[in-house]
Image (cartoon, rainbow, N blue to C red):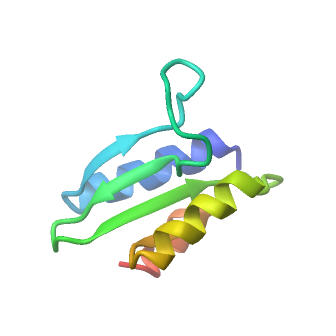
Amino acid sequence: MLERDVQRQIVDGLRALGAVIDVTHDAKHRPATRGVPDIIAALPDGRTLWVECKGEDGEASEEQLSFIGRLRANGHTAIIACSWEDVARYL
């Protein structure tokens, strides 16, 4: 599955749960911090989930891994997901 398809699947799943979502993947079209995950979701239970989407052959960059590490160090849930099932494990 392509990364854009993974992202769409995850966004659709999160929206169905009532999450408020921002998709940050368009950094080339607007200023953004390097390494920020593709999806930031405010879940109905008050948690925030950060998701870096990857397709079949995708690998997280060092910047992405570093950013996710910093989020986790501050107590946030930040994951790399290749499918909706990867996200569902954290819900």
Name the foreground residue: 10 vs 26. Answer: 26
Q: Is residue 88 left or right of residue 69?
A: left
Q: Position of residue 44 (x, y in %)?
A: 16, 66
Depth order, front residue of 19/76: 76
Residue 81 x/y as whole percent: 59, 64
Residue 90 horizontal/vertical position (percent) = 42, 79
Q: How many marks?
A: 0
Q: Is residue 41 above or below residue 77?
A: above
One can see residue 79 in this view: no
Image location of residue 48, percent across then percent down: 30, 65
Residue at 69% from the left image edge and 52% from the top image edge: 63
Of 75 and 3, the residue lying toward us: 75
Q: Is residue 54 above or below residue 79?
A: above
Residue found at x 79% / y 56%: 59
**Is residue 74 among what the camera can see?**
yes
Residue ID at (32%, 56%): 41
The quarter holding residue 91 reads bottom left
In the image, taking residue 48 as reference, residue 25 lies left or right, namely: right
